[in-house]
Image (cartoon, grey):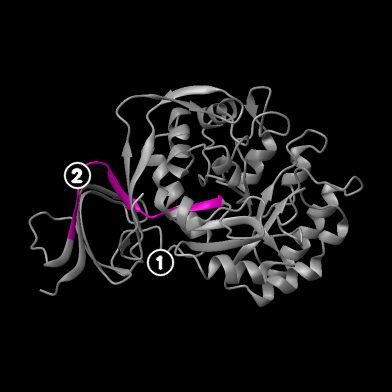
Amino acid sequence: MSGHELLIKSSMLSCPATGTYGPGIIGINGERIAHLNMDPGDPVAPATDTLEVNDGILLPGLVDLHAHPSLANSRFGVDPDRFLLPRGSTTVLSQGDAGARNVDEYIRNTIELSTTTVKLAINFCANGESNQAGRFFSLDEAGVSECVAAIRRSDSHIWGISLNIAFIRGRNVDPLEVLRRGFNAAEETGVPVMFGATKDSKIPLADQLRWLRAGDVMTYCFHSGEGSIVQDGQLLDCVWDARERGVLFDVGDGFAAFGFDTAEIAIAEGFLPDTISSDFYKAHVSAGIEHDLPLVVSKLIASGMGAEECWPRITSVPARVLGIGDDVGRLQAGARADLCVLKQGVEPEELLDGHGQVRMGFRWQPVMTIKSGRVVGT
């Protein structure tokens, strides 16, 4: 019986991608899972190192579909290896940290230098988030051909287009014109769009959602207030219609983009998010606020979801959305050895949304991360 470099014995593991749940043993060689054993009676191959996980749940490494990993030139950017990877997120999609004019630098300085797997939703704003004052000061920043060229020269790193029409800075820049141009670029390159709505009622949400196609993602889906998916105490018909045609909905918690009131109504109506993401960015670090994907999961559970409903939405589903579901987001022989251990708190805590609303809930915390077969801790 051949040995393993690392053997992990867990009292409870869960892999939504394969339906595997219960006590198990994972053998790792190099950067890959070599063996998964769910039968305690089977013999276990020897290993150079062994880890025992008897407190918490072992999951595939978390896949955060909306955060801001960036080592330079982004007003939102954080070091993914310092602030995201130790908190369980082994794969992260950058929500628009770079645009057509700085994507090459972003690939060199962030994607290629990070241990964390980083993919990019390229910002349709050509300058990305490099301007501290914001984006889309003029339509010059919304060039279709410029975006298309950037995607074509770096498509192995780019998942799709980040098209956020909230808080456009140019006084004479029409959000719907930016929207039209962004989807033209997406159509020309055949990539999906990560969409951020206006967050106000000046342009009805229905007029925005009609642009989204199957496979596109609306983030900030539980935003509370003007422009919300919930109005007058119920989910808008246009939101149900969008889901029916294959549009996906992502949480993108962030600082003020999640409201318990919206989430609770949507979940009670049976409208669960397709993916759960953190929208972790520099403001969390500057304010000393502890924020991570397991915390966002805790808020969703406090809003009415079950833990077992959350696990696929932070592992296998976002991995599939990114097109890498055969390699990450799963515990299976041959898959990349990205794993994490989460532990639920024993006492309820105050959980806050972006508007100061409080719910009591049990907080999930990361206690261990393994990236490509190597323990990176917390």
Percent across and percent down for residue 347 are 32, 25
The mark found on residue 327 in the picture is 1
Q: Is 325 placed above or below 254 here?
A: below
> Where is residue 337 shown, x and y percent of the image?
33, 64
Near mark 2 (Cα within 10 A), the count class, few <14, some 14-19 or many ≥20, is few
Q: Secondary structure at mark 2?
A: loop
| Residue 310 in the figure: left or right of residue 124 | left
- Going by the picture, which residue comes out furthest to the right? 172
Name which of mark 1 and mark 2 comes first in the sequence.
Answer: 2
Q: Nearer the viewer, residue 345 or 82?
A: 82
Question: Is the magenta region chiefly helix, strand or loop?
Answer: strand
- Is disc 1 surrounded by few (<14), some (14 to 19) or many (20+) residues within 10 Å? some
Residue 54: mark: 2
Q: Secondary structure at mark 1?
A: loop
The magenta stretch spans residue 234: no
| Quarter of the rendering containing residue 202 | top right
Where residue 2 appears, as percent x and y from the top left, is 13, 75
Q: Which residues are magenta?
A: 50-66
- Residue appearing at x 38%, y 55% in the figure: 61
58 in magenta: yes
Distance in Å between CA atoms under marks 1 and 2: 26 Å
Question: Does residue 47 appear to the left or right of 349 in the view shown?
Answer: left
Is residue 88 something that shows in the picture? no
Instruction: Please name whichever residue, 131 or 17, is drawn nearer the observer in this view of the structure.
Output: 131
Q: Position of residue 1 (x, y in %)?
A: 10, 74
Q: Identify which residue is drawn at 69% across, 28% down.
A: 225
Vertical relation: 71 (above or below) 245: below
Q: Which amino acid type is shown beneath numbered disc 1?
A: Asp
**Dots 1 and 2: beta carbons under 8 Å?**
no
On screen, residue 41 above or below 258: below
Residue type marked 2: Asn
